[in-house]
Image (tube, rainbow, N blue to C red):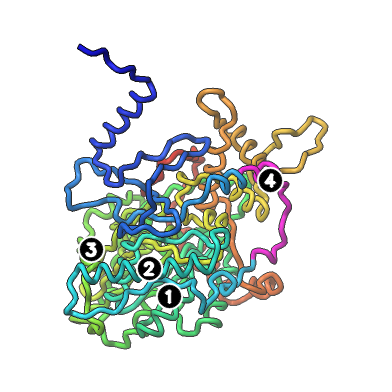
Amino acid sequence: MPRKKPFSVKQKKKQLQDKRERKRGLQDGVRSSSNSRSGSRERKEDQTDTSDGESITQQIRRLNQQPTQGLGHNYDPNRYRLHFERESREEVERRKRAAREQLLKPVSEKSLELDIGDIYHPGSNLDFPRRPSWNYEMSREQLMSQEERSFQEYLGKIHGSYTSEQLSYFEHNLETWRQLWRVLEMSDIVLLITDIRHPVINFPPALYEYVTGELGLSLILVLNKVDLAPPALVIAWKYHFRLHYPRLHLVLFTSFPRDPQTPQDSKTVLKKRRKQGRIWTRALGPEQLLRACETITAGKVDLSSWKEKMDRDAAGASRDTGLGEEEGDEEAPAVLVEQQTDVALEPTGPIRERYKDGVVTIGCVGFPNVGKSSLINGLVGRKVVSVSRTPGHTRYFQTYFLTPTVRLCDCPGLIFPSLLPRQLQVLAGIYPIAQIQEPYTSVGYLASRIPIQALLRLRHPEAQDSGHEPPWCAWDICEAWAEKRGYKTAKAARNDVYRAANSLLRLAADGRLSLCLRPPGYSDQRASWESHPETLELMMMQGRVGLSGEDEDEEEELSSSGEEEHF
């Protein structure tokens, strides 16, 4: 019998990894990314791909890998994963060095004023892919092949016009864009939801022109999460959009109202409000949205059932004060939910009947993490949509019948191409924080614009007892936060700066370290906006609604692992 060939430990380890992959049935044939906190290594992929399987000239990094074990063969949970352009290892290492070497300098308030035209360049190739023309004689395979070719041409134009350093992260997954096409085709009214802290990021002018121009639909711009920005800034953004985009209907919204007089200081940064009672019925903005829909439909749809529902919810909220959310929802009427997956690939007629069967369909679109699902929960009056801080949590569009005549359609979040700095995109919650390769420069970007050191009471790692504080860099802030929170590496017990950086980015995404962008000219007109009548009205409304419930503050142990909180 021949002697066995020597088998090293490294080869045995690889053999076991391959065996586990085969058991999991991973369709892309790659290992899951490393869970190291010091910077995960990229998965090795023989060729780049998009959802349609065709290779493109740019490398693609696929995020939010989901397990497939125990699922049917016809269901692919990774079909709508986020697909972003892969950054080179040299670029990542260059930014890491910059985080250690470049000293932070405070920037002026003027730098927070961003113009939408500087980010999206209306009329350029920074557009979004459109569904190509088709006819009823085409088969399903012909239609999909045509869409794939058109999408590859779209990507080629963008990457041919701009370098990787100029472009922001944007969606390279055709399957997710197909979801947007279907939602727009189904909708009578389109809701574009934006985060009030940075609506300039979440408002692509190309989508505005397409919806209001080519499709001829009404577009409602929802400025969401108004509780996270000063009321004067909220009103300034409202008038900015009204001036430059006159075909918009504007609505202010928040699912969690709070008193706007609460200051941001070191005592409140680590406090997370514990919600008591039926929190979804306290949403601020459903009445404005109803009035906007009544104006658009002009009596063609009976919306009285929506008004009656809001009156019932308000009465039920006052009656059930002190009860938990689940207790208060036990007797609530059921909401019909329809999950739409493969239907997004089916062609629909080029001209569809508006308000068919007396039902208005309202499509909710927007970037990841702007609060689309929370908005639907706020309109329904209770939790019917799963909510997460992880971008890309909504994986396919669903429809919800708010009332027999009002249907809501929730679309997965989509990131449109722009020239926005990628660090700002990370702070806006567009990129999954747990999968960021280099979070330090984003922390530095934030620290140059708000006083993180003072808010968190950080002590410089190299500070002496003499009282003189050395200059800060992004790495110093992460190390000081790791020291304060006790984040240590497992083996050497050093300060875990990667975990600390992720923790700081989560504070920013949650609004506890609030960075708010401003419309052009806001700094010069701040006093007039602060004394504006609508500003005072918004402050009174937020204070009245926010105090109607009982919120308790508790210090939260900040999660910095790969797990995100689901509400």
Neighbour tally class for label 3: few under 14, some 14-19, many 20 plus, Cα within 10 Å: some
**Residue 407 appears in the rendering:** yes
Sequence-earlier tag: 1 or 4: 1
- Front tag of 2 and 4: 2
Quadrant of residue 374 in the image?
Answer: bottom left
User: Residues under labels 1 and 4: Cα distance?
Assistant: 40 Å
Q: Which residue is mark 1?
A: 207
Q: Check if residue 189 falls in the magenta segment.
A: no
Neighbour tally class for label 1: few under 14, some 14-19, many 20 plus, Cα within 10 Å: some
Counting from the top left corner in percent of width and height, residue 174 is at 34, 63
Sequence-earlier tag: 3 or 1: 1
- Front tag of 3 and 4: 3
Q: Amino acid at mark 2?
A: Val
Q: Which residue is mark 3?
A: 340
462 shown above or below 263: above
Q: Are marks 2 and 4 in contact (CB under 8 Å)?
A: no
Secondary element at image label 4 = helix
Q: Which residue is mark 4?
A: 454
Q: Amino acid at mark 4?
A: Ala
Q: Amino acid at mark 3?
A: Gln
Q: Check if residue 110 falls in the magenta segment.
A: yes
- The numbered mark at residue 42 is none
Neighbour tally class for label 2: few under 14, some 14-19, many 20 plus, Cα within 10 Å: many
Secondary element at image label 2 = strand
Q: Which residue is mark 2?
A: 365
Sequence-earlier tag: 2 or 3: 3
Left or right: where does residue 451 sit relative to residue 386? right
Counting from the top left corner in percent of width and height, residue 192 is at 41, 71
* Region of the chain picked out in magenta, as a range: 96-112
Q: Are marks 1 and 2 in contact (CB under 8 Å)?
A: yes
